[in-house]
Image: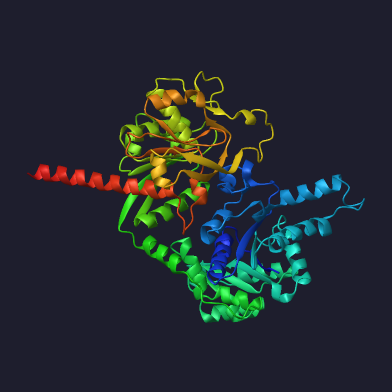
Amino acid sequence: MAKYIFVTGGVTSSLGKGIIAASLAKLLQARGFRVTIQKFDPYINVDPGTLNPYEHGECYVTEDGAETDLDLGHYERFLNIFTSQSNNVTTGRIYQTVINKERAGDFLGKTVQVVPHITDEIKRRMLLLGTEGNYDIVITEIGGTVGDIESLPFIEAVRQLQWELPDEDVVVVHLTLIPYLRAAKELKTKPTQHSVKMLSETGVHPDIIVCRTEEPLGNDIKRKIALFCNVKPEAVIEAMDASTIYEVPLLMLREKLDQICLRKLNVTIFPEPDLTKWKGFLDKLKYPKSKVSIGLIGKYIELQDAYKSILESFIHAGAINEVKVQVVNVHSEFITKENVAEKLQGLDGLLVAPGFGLRGIEGKIIAVEYARVNKLPFFGICLGMQMAVIEYARNVLGLKDAHSTEMDTATKNPVINMMEEQKKIRLMGGTMRLGSYPCKLNENSLAHKIYGETDITERHRHRYEFNNEYLEQFESKGMMASGKNPETGLVEIMEIPSHPFFIGVQYHPELKSTVERPAPLFVHFIAAAKEYNEQQASVSTAALQDALI
């Protein structure tokens, strides 16, 4: 039977519960345990699929097509394993399930209440991966902070499980903040004391307290926290700010977080962790040999979490290529024909990001044209690929009014069109083309060179597709469909063979990039940007030498 670790948070949001949970899971996995992580989110939305990226960051999509919290991306990137629908549960999904049961008469006329009916459903979901999955340890992250009204049913469910399960099968890890007051030059423990007190008042007592801090915690402060929060001094864990999230597992290893958890779970014999690959990745990440600048063209750049998986994929690909990837955010809404050269000056590559809606579209199209004409390495993802198709249709095929029916329903040349099965859908949540789909690659293509195989699978999240009625025109003018869905014939990849590196994909390769298995498209895109950077440097050197002569 699986054992359970619950990770709660207090004082403030965005402390990094997801990173702590993923780091602990990585250490346990490195010691040979079968581990998975799940996230329970307190918001009433059924899933984040209909949320604006500014509200909740990116919507992460799993292999089985679940639209989930972005923390699941961290789980997959750290553990190098797939998550699923079961790994992310919201209050909305809990209530939806209970209400459907009530409507079906499953409660036999009883009054349906938060306790026990809602909490029973929460507990069922919390234990599901442990009873049905092949795991030794299940880590459950509780979203929000202790004291939030929305989180109370989840905390109550944890309390009940602490009571119902054997002591050696449950551990509660509580993440708090130890603020540093620069005026007083002191670390303050009172917020942590209040947070633990609030958690204890719900009936849940933490076994381990992880303290986020900007300054090192001395032994005196650790003993003080232990005394006032009723834990052992060794169970007070220092979580210093790190230069990269990928250092956190090593910091937690030094603090022995995993060993303390295992001892609490009555696991006394375990091997040393094998982190060879992880440390090798970190060495390349921290000591790059060169640098490239990549322009990220998007319309949600004010919130970096909106493109979280893309940014992490750049880190993975940069480490493989031994380069530091400097991402330059460029808001597509402010790109014009007149300023595009100035805004994209000095870049070694251009990525046009995913998105929805009309805002900023023309700026993306202008940026694509700049990359195509100036032989700048280009990579388009989902909407980015569609913008590349529209730009080519307008400026090479001569279809000046070419557009997507998402932005212009009346266009006479809908080179991007809604899928037929999507046209009848009225409910927006969870109804896009979601999850993993197969793609067959043309052997004489850049895509095939990148993947090194003919048959691949990648994850999708979209309603609109390339309109195959225009495919012959595109290919006759030099843009090739190098990847198609073998079952439907839908175009998955478009590229320009005459360009040094110009490729757009309908799917989201960033969703499968991990530390140990970087996304091939990102690896080759960064390699192309590195080569472009070296060529530009060579040209500049030659020009300088000519000037001196």
Left or right, 89 with respect to 418, comes to right
Percent x, y of residue 489: 53, 32
Rendered position, 547 above or below 34: above
- Residue lying farthest to the left in this orientation: 549
- The quadrant of the picture occupied by the C terminus is top left
Q: Where is 414 relative to 172, above or below?
A: above
Report whether residue 406 is seen: no
Which residue is farthest top?
412
Q: Is residue 98 left or right of residue 394?
A: right
Frontmost residue, 144 versus 278: 278
Q: Residue at x 65, y 55 (%)?
A: 87
Picture coordinates of residue 492 (x, y %)? Answer: 49, 37
Residue 417 on image: x %, y %: 55, 27
Q: Position of residue 519 (x, y in %)?
A: 45, 50
The residue at 78%/71% (across/down) is 163
Quarter occupied by residue 223: bottom right
Answer with left or right where residue 388 lies relative to residue 170: left
Count of numbered marks: 0
Image point (30%, 34%), residue name: 374
Quadrant in the picture for the N terminus:
bottom right
Of residues 483 and 204, the one nearer the viewer is 483
Query: Is residue 282 among what the camera can see?
Result: yes
Quick one: 494 or 149, which is closer to the camera? 494
Indicate the colouring scheme.
Answer: rainbow
Q: What residue sits 51% from the left and 26% below the top?
A: 468
Q: Which quarter of the figure has residue 103?
A: top right
Examine the image and state in which quarter residue 21 appears: bottom right
